[in-house]
Amino acid sequence: MRLLAFSLGIASCAVMLAGCDYGARRALGIHPFDTGGPKTSGFRSRIPLPGLALLAPQSEPNCEFPTTDSQSGERQRLDYERQCYRHAEMIARARLLVLQRSVAKTIRAIERCKSCG
């Protein structure tokens, strides 16, 4: 019985983590099957460029605490804002990582072109 409960807990954690990855990719405007690799046309491969969604400026996070409840205290407001800014920072870091990888692919493609001709 404990083994079943443990495996159920592990499975639910895995599903939550997979959902977080999907949500972060959707927030970044990245299609799950888009690898960002070079597109080929004919015999020559084109230089891969970072996606326009990654190059666009990121909007400010909206972390203002909704004040619909008059019973909410200062501690609850601060906790909400802390979590909101933490989540926004995680999204910004993920976006930066994807952009850095995309730029690295561009640099490698340019260096390959220089060595070929």
Image (tube, grey):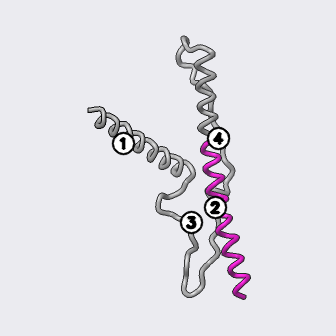
Location of residue 75 by image quarter: top right
Marks 4 and 1, how far apart at CA: 27 Å
Label 3 Cα neighbours within 10 Å, binned few <14 / some 14-19 / many ≥20:
some
For the residues labelled 3 and 1, the Cα–Cα distance comes to 30 Å
Which of the marked residues, 2 or 1, is nearer the chain's N terminus? 1
From the viewer's perspective, is 33 left or right of 72?
Answer: left
Type of secondary structure dominating the magenta stretch? helix
Closer to the observer: label 2 or label 1? 1
Q: Which of marks 3 and 2 is in front?
A: 2
Is label 4 in a helix, a strand or a loop?
Answer: helix
Tell me the kind of residue under disc 3.
Gly
Q: Badge 2 is on which residue? A: 101
Residue furthest to the top in view is 71
**Residue labelled with disc 4:** 89
Please give the residue where the numbered disc 3 appears in the rendered image. Answer: 36
**Closer to the camera in the image, 9 or 87:** 9
Q: What residue type is labelled 4?
A: Glu
- The correct choice, above or below, for 53 with respect to 116 in the image is above
Spatial CA distance of label 2 from label 1 is 30 Å
Magenta span has 96?
yes
Q: Mark 1 points at which residue?
A: 11
Asked whether disc 3 touches disc 4, contact meaning CB atoms under 8 Å apart, the reply is no
- Is residue 54 one of those drawn in magenta? no
Q: Do the residues under discs 3 and 2 have CB atoms within 8 angstroms?
A: yes
SS at mark 1 in the image: helix
Between the residue at mark 3 and the residue at mark 2, the CA separation in whole angstroms equals: 9 Å
Lower position in the chain sequence, tag 3 or tag 4: 3
